[in-house]
Image (tube, grey):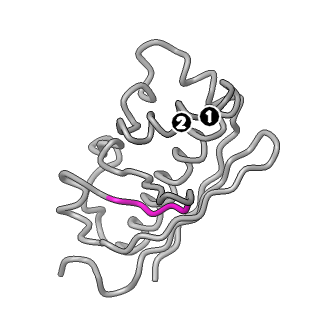
């Protein structure tokens, strides 16, 4: 099993999200943005999206850990972050679903993620099962 974790400072994340042309404009999928839009206040939307960003980063770290000692399958500058989606079920529990080049390269389908928030911080941990990636 590979594990990745990330933490995001929500106020700094919100500042970056507000910058026109920042990379954060296109990292979220339409579903992620629709779910965030249901949050009652701007601060709750920012908290929610910061958690999703932490989950995406945690996934990249877990996936990268699988290649320890070998070159990465995809460079960080080649990651299309919108191909990594935090998908909730109707009760709000989340998994990571992949699409595009990331799905083809990674090959994982059972990607567990847990997201938590406390004060100014959002954190996420992601686990990838062993033996589910392409040879």
- Label 2's element? helix
The secondary structure that most of the magenta stretch takes on is: strand
Q: Position of residue 90 (x, y in %)?
A: 49, 58
Looking at the picture, does residue 21 appear above or below residue 117? above
Q: Residues within 10 Å of mark 2 (few under 14, many from 20)?
A: some
Looking at the picture, does residue 52 appear above or below residue 73? above
- Residue that badge 2 annotates: 36
Q: Report how far apart the C-alphas of labels 1 and 2 lie in the structure.
A: 6 Å
Give whichever of 51, 73 is nearer the camera.
51
Give whichever of 11, 92 is nearer the camera.
92
Q: Position of residue 62 (x, y in %)?
A: 46, 67
- Residue that badge 1 annotates: 39
Furthest-front residue in this view: 90
Q: Residue at x 41, y 25 (%)?
A: 25
Q: Which residues are magenta?
A: 93-97
Q: Position of residue 121 (x, y in %)?
A: 74, 44
User: What is the quadrant of residue 71 in the picture?
Assistant: bottom left
Q: Residue at x 45, y 21 (%)?
A: 22
- Label 1's element? loop
Q: Residue at x 56, y 49 (%)?
A: 54
| Residue 47: in magenta span | no
Looking at the picture, does residue 130 appear above or below residue 58? below
Q: Position of residue 33 (x, y in %)?
A: 45, 34
Give the side of residue 117 with respect to residue 135, left or right. right
User: What is the quadrant of residue 34 in the picture?
Assistant: top left
Check if mark 1's residue and mark 2's residue have beta carbons within 8 Å.
Answer: yes
Give the side of residue 131 with respect to residue 87, left or right. left
Q: Residue at x 82, y 43 (%)?
A: 119
């Amino acid at each position: 099993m590979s594990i990745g974790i990330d933490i995001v400072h929500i106020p700094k994340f919100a500042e970056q999200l507000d910058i026109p042309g920042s990379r954060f404009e296109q990292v979220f999928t339409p579903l992620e943005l629709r779910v965030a839009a249901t949050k009652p206040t701007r601060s709750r939307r920012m908290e929610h999206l910061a958690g999703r960003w932490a989950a995406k980063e945690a996934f990249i770290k877990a996936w990268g850990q699988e290649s320890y000692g070998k070159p990465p399958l995809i460079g960080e500058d080649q990651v299309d972050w919108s191909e990594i989606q935090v998908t909730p079920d109707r009760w709000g529990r989340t998994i990571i679903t992949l699409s595009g080049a990331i799905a083809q390269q990674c090959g994982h389908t059972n990607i567990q993620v847990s997201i938590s928030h406390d004060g100014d911080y959002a954190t996420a941990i992601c686990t990838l099962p062993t033996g589910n990636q392409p040879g």
